[in-house]
Amino acid sequence: MNDIKELMHKVDEHEDSILFLSQQLEQALPPHDHQKGQLLLVFGGIAYLQTREKDFYIPSNHYIWIPGAYTHSLMFNAQDLYITNIYFPSTDKYDDPFYNELGIYPVSKLLSEILNFAGQWYGNYFEGSWEYEVLSTLKHLLPKENLKKFSIQLPTTDDVRLKKITVYIKDNLQEALTLAHIADQFGLSIRSTTRLFNEKLQISFVQYVKMLRVIHAMQLLKDSDMSISEIAYEVGYSSIAAFSNTFQQLTNLRPTEFKSMIQ
């Protein structure tokens, strides 16, 4: 389905159905939304979900819950990435706050078993069918698992000054990036630079740099043969322990665990 209108028509064609689509996506769709809530599962690579406020990074064996009427677009850079989408009607009986917030979580063993059971399902399933009951139960279980959110959420901005700063940071991650250095580089005071990050991105300079470094490390873990220590140095860490601790803080996984998960 290369036509976004065709896809949106298919998703919301039957407002009371659960739509199951398991397919290899070959290009990003433009920003869009639909009335149904979306369970998007990622296997074999890293996907990127863009919204108006943030870019979300979804590693292999994780899922993202997207509430209905939430504008987004999906991007990825791995040929072996495999996506499963399940669209749930907004009219169903489940009203847990979980379903009102966008969130990324690991695919648990229980969820994985249900997906394996679903096998090659495809298309719309309606109330009264056993497929509908299985998928409805799957949705009901999501908030019950109480899993930790995957917290790589990089805020974006239209501020011209801050865009230049963030591009510079991205291009110089291997360097010892400090707030004082960035402020001097762009002719700003430390106070002004701090305020830019806090007001425009709602995140501190230090946290933003941490996010970018871990994101780049994720990409290297997926796409390169570099060792963990080489990757730590490449993204600006002189201590493997500090790199590993920061990586775990933001992803709930050690770099070695993440690498084994995406291979």
Image (cartoon, rainbow, N blue to C red):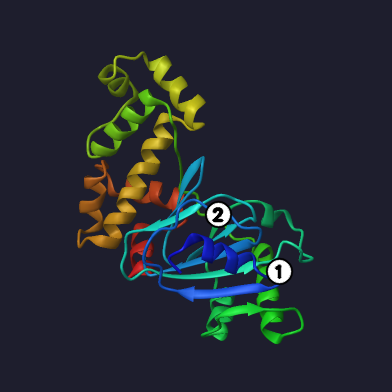
Sequence order check, earlier mark of 2 and 1: 1
Q: Is residue 41 left or right of residue 46?
A: right
- The image shows residue 39 at horizontal and vertical percentages of 58, 65
Amino acid type at image mark 2:
Lys
Judged left or right of residue 126, residue 163 is left
Residue furthest out toward the right:
93
Q: Which residue is mark 1?
A: 140
Residues 145 and 157: in front is: 157
Crowding at dot 2, Cα within 10 Å, few <14 / some 14-19 / many 20+, comes out as some
Split into 4 quadrants, where in the image is the C terminus?
bottom left
* Residue 255 locus on image (x, y percent): 35, 58
Mark on residue 149? 2
Evaluate if marks 2 and 1 touch, with contact meaning CB atoms under 8 Å apart. Answer: no
Residue for point 29% across, 14% down: 187
In space, the residues marked 2 and 1 are separated at their CA atoms by: 17 Å
In the image, residue 54 above or below residue 29: above
Q: Is residue 68 above or below residue 43?
A: above
Q: Is residue 109 above or below residue 57?
A: below
Q: Image point 36% across, 48% down: which residue?
A: 214
Point 70% across, 74% down: residue: 136
Mark 1 residue crowding within 10 angstroms, few (<14) / some (14–19) / many (20+): some
